[in-house]
Image (cartoon, rainbow, N blue to C red):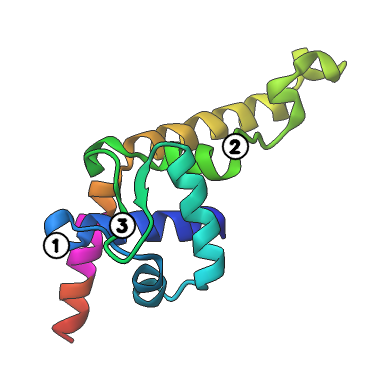
Amino acid sequence: MRVDYGVRALVELALHEGGKPMQTPEIASRQNIPEAYLDQVMTTLHKAGLIYSRRGPQGGHTLAADPKKIDLGMIMSALEGKSRLLDCLVEPQGCEMSNACAQREVWRDFEESVQELLGTTTIAHMATRQRELTVALSKH
């Protein structure tokens, strides 16, 4: 859920007109995210350098970089850390079968494909697609 909420919040910031800061309650309301939980996510995204945050009545959150430069891999890493499907992908010496394991090869290839997709999908891509889907939905 942290990654889902984080991506939705960053897409909302990318879609926000004029680059003015958005406050957490507004993002939470527009994206249907529990405000208290979003606050925690935004704090983590701020610490990771993906957003700027400022307190106070004129405060709020803005993207810390061009949305074309923020990819899903960065967000996932910030919110969930580096996780692997199998321990042997990180520590092959921990399994005596890892050198001759067909399953390990499949999961490694899968992991590489996922990382490639996350690394090439940006907040800009997501915001563009969100606009397209919103327009298409409004026509029906």
Image quadrant holding the C terminus, namely bottom left
Q: Residues within 10 Å of mark 3 (few under 14, many from 20)?
A: many
The kind of secondary structure element at disc 2 is: loop
Identity of the residue drawn at 27% across and 35% down? 69
Contact, mark 2 vs mark 1 (Cβ under 8 Å): no
Image quadrant holding the N terminus, namely bottom right
Above or below residue 91? Residue 108 is below
Determine which of the numbered discs, if any, sits on residue 55 in the image. Answer: none
Spatial CA span between label 2 and label 3: 20 Å
Sequence order check, earlier mark of 3 and 1:
3
Residue 96 visible? The answer is yes
Residue tagged 1: 17
Q: Amino acid at mark 2?
A: Gly
Q: Position of residue 105 (x, y in %)?
A: 64, 24
Total marks shown come to 3
Q: Amino acid at mark 1?
A: Glu
Q: Secondary structure of the magenta portion, mostly?
A: helix
Which mark's residue is nearer the viewer, 2 or 1? 1
Residue tagged 3: 11
Contact, mark 2 vs mark 3 (Cβ under 8 Å): no
Determine which of the numbered discs, if any, sits on residue 81 in the image. Answer: 2
Position of 96 compared to 136: left or right?
right
Q: Position of residue 101 (x, y in %)?
A: 75, 21
Identity of the residue drawn at 13% across and 83% down? 139
Magenta segment range? Answer: 127-133
Sequence order check, earlier mark of 2 and 3:
3
Outermost residue, bottom side: 140
